[in-house]
Image: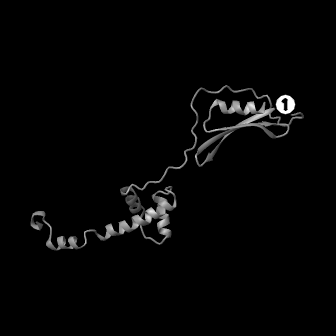
Amino acid sequence: MCRVLSVARSGFYAWVQCPLSDRAIEDIRLLRRVREFYTASDGVYGSPRILLDLREAGERVGKKRVARIMREHRVRAIRGYKKPRKVVGLTSAIAPNRLQRQFTFDRPDAAWVTDITYIRTWEGWLYLAVVLDLHSRMIVGWSMQPTLERGIVLDALLMAV
């Protein structure tokens, strides 16, 4: 059989005694360490951060080897949060500047200002719309929703009213 496959007899018997190469054995040991650091990070770390953890633990390994081991065994990082994209649609009508940068008022409910911001949470992005009274500097209405739609502003205004 060795003659048909053009393999030396000594190589065949060496393979029979130890079917895995030294590199394959080392890769299996590294895979255990990679999975250990991967689960410690709750699946967030990719190969660059796993490499830093391995080196911090005293392993001498290259970045391409760690990436290859993770790719072969389908160990992938969970993607992080995505930043909210610009909402594409019709351009909004620009309202006239009635305050003329005068932000102090003598009586309550003379002027309100609004703002919309987004907040990152563990479950995704939340959008917050607030209505602020310029006399007392207090929030008189607010609304929070997971989507940026017209209703979030209307709810904040209705709360203020």
For the point 44% across and 62% down, the residue is 35
| 107 horizontally vs 6: left or right | right
Quadrant in which the N terminus is drawn = bottom left
- The image position of residue 7, as x and y in percent, is 15, 67
For the point 72% across and 26% down, the residue is 95
- The image position of residue 142, as x and y in percent, is 73, 37
For the point 83% across and 35% down, the residue is 102
- Which residue corresponds to mark 1? 110
Residue 95 vs 3, above or below: the answer is: above
Task: Bin the neighbour count of mark 1 within 10 Å (Cα to Cα): few under 14, some 14-19, many 20 and up.
Answer: few
Residue 40 vs 88, above or below: the answer is: below
| 27 horizontally vs 130: left or right | left
- The image position of residue 83, as x and y in percent, is 57, 44
Quadrant in which the C terminus is drawn = top right
- Give, as a three-letter code, the residue at label 1: Ala
Q: Quadrant of residue 108?
A: top right
Q: Quadrant of residue 20?
A: bottom left
The outermost residue toward the right is 106
Q: Quadrant of residue 65?
A: bottom left
Q: Could you say whether the residue bearing mark 1 is in a helix, strand or loop? A: loop
